[in-house]
Amino acid sequence: IVPFYDRNELVTTALGTVRGALLQGAILVLLVLVFFMGHLRSSALVALQLPMAALATFLVMGLFGMSLNLMTLSGLAIAIGMLGDGAIVLVENAVRLLARPKDAERERCGVMCQAATEVARPVTFGVAVIIVVFIPIASLQGVEGKMFAPLAYTIGIALGCSLIFTMTVIPVLASLILKPVPVFGGGKIPHPADVVRRMYRPHLRWALDHPWIVLGTAAGLLVVAGALVPTLGTEFLPTMDEGSIVVQPFQIPSVSLEQSLKTVELIEKTIMELPEVRHVVSRTGRSDISSDPMGVGESDTYVLLAPRSEWTTAHTKEGLVAAIREKLATIPGVEFGYTQPIQMRVDELLSGVKSQIAVKIFGDDLHELALLGDEASEIISGIRGAADVKVEAVEGLGYLQIVMDRQRSSRMGISFAQVRTLIETAIGGRVVTTVPEGDRRTDVVVRLPRWFTAEVENLRDLPLSNPGGARVLLREVADFEVVEGPAQISREDGKRRVVVELNVVDRDIGGFVEEAQQRLHENLVLPTGYFVTWGGQFEQQQRAMARLRVMVPVVLVLIFILLYLNFRSTRPVLLILVNIPLALVGGIVGLKLFGLYLSVSASVGFIALFGIAVLNGLVMVEFFRNLEGEGMSRLEAVLEGAELRLRPVLMTAATTALGLVPMVWASGVGSEVQRPLAVVVVFGVVTSTLLTLMVLPVLYLRWGGDASAVRVGKTSA
């Protein structure tokens, strides 16, 4: 037995794509550490955190029975850039303390304890905040929950492990291998950090001298980003290229099995004419699954493709599907749907149909439903982006109707019960006795051969006997007529319904459904008691977004509470939360630049940005307040704190962003689902960091504490 379709190949390829992106991201993170820290011992110490936390994550996942799959590896890829954040802050603080003359002669363990103690609270609260922001993802239900909840769990486990190592292992190792290194303010400074510092300080001074220009620019960027949101388009999830195609031929319900197989064979030969096609295998009809039966007029044709490098007809999957659609359009009497093996099952799980969108019309009369379905199909077909529009076949199946003439049967002495028993026995069979076999009993059924009952004339000539013993043919007491009747009667929640199913191409699903709903509302007249619902990916998208709309505000409240517990003051908490909308700017711009839609995947990226933005602001504001507590003025604290936090802020941002850059440019199987998430995080981290370094110091200088204590003056004075 040779399998013609093996999902293991798809799974292996998709995991390989994510593993490759994860490895590349880890390498970029290590290069960033060396570049910014400019000190091999410090870089090696932070770099050691990554494999330790990753291995611990795998161990904990194993204890909880979690598998390595596309989404758990994606979660680790998101977390890989954040695993070293706590270690970066701690090591950078330790190096700063070691470089101070008053600490140079202190016992190394004492210095490390002080370094860890100073950053313990902000680092712990920062990790807690990031874990909390993923609660909405972990709370998703249905298909989206099955997909993205493991991602949230993996990130939480990874960050928890990294926090434990940061507070326990890293200080011990730092006390053993770190040596005093001059930092900002004296001595020879590592080249990259020195260059960045010298570029940053004059810009920071300018920003503090021109606060309203800085704040106005930030507000303008927010307005621009807000204006871009309606133009993004929405969808449930990006379509993952599975490397194969499923063509779904739909023939008339009354087609014979022989004719259906001939048509499917013609379809297979037509598809095989394309050089990109390796194999074509079809399955026609299915009765073995009661919840998903298929008539003889329905088929699933699996099209297995050659490697992308061998394609000549088209260079994209969409182009190849368009070529197949064009070739099959010449076959009369057949409607086609186009999907992929796994996508077909997911769509069917979502809405009961094997297409992206299902328009369900409910009512009582089957004929009226069929007419409404045809009318809705015609309206939808005229909307840009509609493809493979077809109506569920609820009529058109041929039935043999046998109508007994009671007057003739009475004259000939034939009863209705005799006719019914004869037809039942001839076609369906009748149990006449049972045969015992030990503890089992087997029914003995008498019926006529299938080949005999397949011909109407044979049924017409079936004999009956009247009480007088005369022989009467069935045709003499009954009329035979072939009529059209229901092909199937579908119900949902006890109501009859017909489905118009379709796919959307070259357009976002959210925008398409919005326009289609408007068109149907204006042009489709529904009788009293009839109504329309929408299913498929759009329904899941709406459900996921509705849940996020509830959970995200709840999480923001939790973040506020965590930050308030840390600062015991409302004002610094509000300053930190300002970072969140500033982070959204980059994510929105990134989606627009890459032509991506706002999906559940992109929403996960935005939620991840919440935590990253809050963490950056938390570390900086905490340091400002510590310096003020040491006796510095607010202006001095802002200048000194922003400069000293520059390197860890840039490093945490760069490691997070560059850890996901490989996912932005990945092109393998499975990359489509991760790309929106990666684009949002990478671009969002860039804008969040830039605005944090410029806007947050301005806000803190003016509103960081008691308004009466703030002295506003030129910083250059």
Image: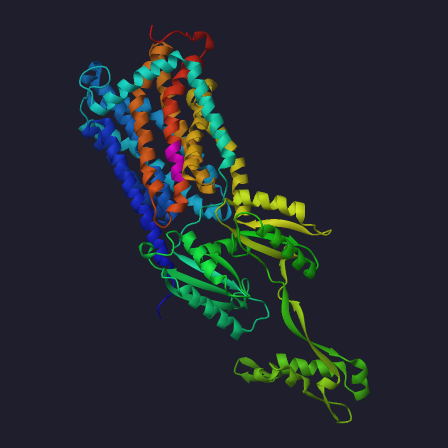
Q: 294 or 560, which lies in front?
A: 294
Residue 564 visible in the displayed image: no
Point out residue 77 in the picture as x, y percentages from the top left corner: 34, 41
Q: How many marks?
A: 0
**Is residue 376 positioned above or below 578 on the image?**
below
Drawn side of residue 70 relative to residue 171, left or right: right
Quadrant in the rendering for residue 27: top left
Is residue 11 found left or right of 348 in the rendered image? Answer: left
Question: Front-most of 66 and 702?
Answer: 702
Identified at 34% across, 59% down, the residue is: 306
Q: Quadrant of the C terminus?
A: top left
Judge whether residue 268 is colored magenta: no
Q: Residue 353 appears at what percent x and percent y?
A: 54, 56
Q: Which residues are magenta?
A: 677-683
Residue 440 picture location, percent across and down:
54, 80
Query: Is 124 drawn above or below residue 433 in the view shown?
Result: above
Image check: 203 left or right of 294? Answer: left
Q: Is residue 647 visible?
A: yes
